[in-house]
Image (cartoon, rainbow, N blue to C red):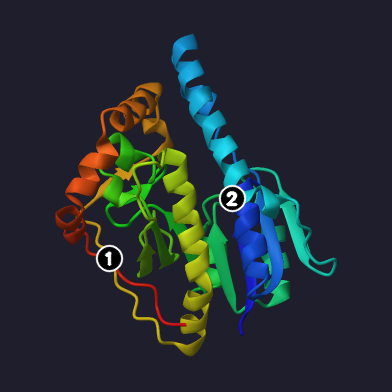
Amino acid sequence: MPRILLLTSTFLRHQYFIHALCRQLDVIGVWREEKSFKPEEYAGNDDDRAVIAKHFDARDRSEEQYFKEWGDQQLPRNMVVHDLPPNTINTPGELAAMRALQPELILVFGSGILREGIIEAFAGKIINLHLGLSPYYRGSGTNFWPLVNGEPEYVGATIHYLDAGIDSGDIICHVRPTITPEGGPHDLGNAAIIAAVEALPAVVSAHARRTIHAAPQRTDIGKLYLRKHFNADAVRTLYANFARGMILDYLREKDARDRALDLLPVPHA
């Protein structure tokens, strides 16, 4: 089993990622970088601020429901752990510390963007858990924007090799959550996270055996969203879509809409 580093962040979903994988893989080090995203900065007025705050409060409550037990767990005392402020994971000191551990594979979920130093040092050995189905949705908020656009079938996760582009590395596989009439936006997002983390041990095994058949990621299709695109009106549209029956509409047309997706399965363990 390869020696693995985890590069991630500090929310409950990231604690789930860490502890679930530590149970199954040979994790030798964990880097946890705080997020720099401050959603309230995207509010134009007090009404917008309230809409955005309500949305992220609901996200936090949903994460408590799904992942609280994982946040209470402790890492082994001999585990190398680096807790970092925002935008510091790419410093020469952190790269040197990663090199010193001589990892055979790095799994990434939710850290800041990795720069060329790390990518070149571990070329072909970095696998990213990207929320959203690439290449259809790339960039930021990629399980948010499908729900704004009335396309819940595009909620999911993509596991891919990391390169220097924006979600552009070769794709290993996709996973999607089960969509039910009862689920809200955060239920879908958290279910996608669980499905992706559960797929990672099989991905690691296939990588170690060199049996992965990764597919180049198309850049001529799909939508790219950046943080600057986020706004309160998009949040309002998302909840209006749920209220008007977007999920039921999708479920009635599920077979036809799912056939339009060109997705890769999880490799065999």
Q: Residues within 10 Å of mark 1 (few under 14, many from 20)?
A: some
Q: Looking at the image, is 45 positioned above or below residue 67?
A: above
Q: Quadrant of residue 246?
A: top left
Q: Which residue is mark 1?
A: 263
The answer, for residue 91, to whether it is visible in the render is no
Determine the residue positioned at 55% across, 72% down: 122
Which type of secondary structure does the marked residue at label 1 adopt?
Answer: loop
Image position, residue 262 (x, y; %): 22, 64
Judge the density around disc 2: few (<14), some (14-19), many (≥20) Cα neighbours within 10 Å.
Answer: many
Asked where in the image residue 108 lies, by quadrant, the reply is bottom right
Instruction: Give the labeled residue for mark 2.
Output: 13
| Residue drawn at the location 73% of the way across and 73% of the way down | 100
Q: Do we see residue 143 in this rendering?
A: yes
- Who comes first in sequence, dot 1 or dot 2? 2
Indicate the amino acid at tag 1: Leu
- On the image, the x and y values in percent for residue 65 come to 60, 43
Q: Residue furthest right?
A: 77
Q: Observer-nearest residue: 38 or 71? A: 71
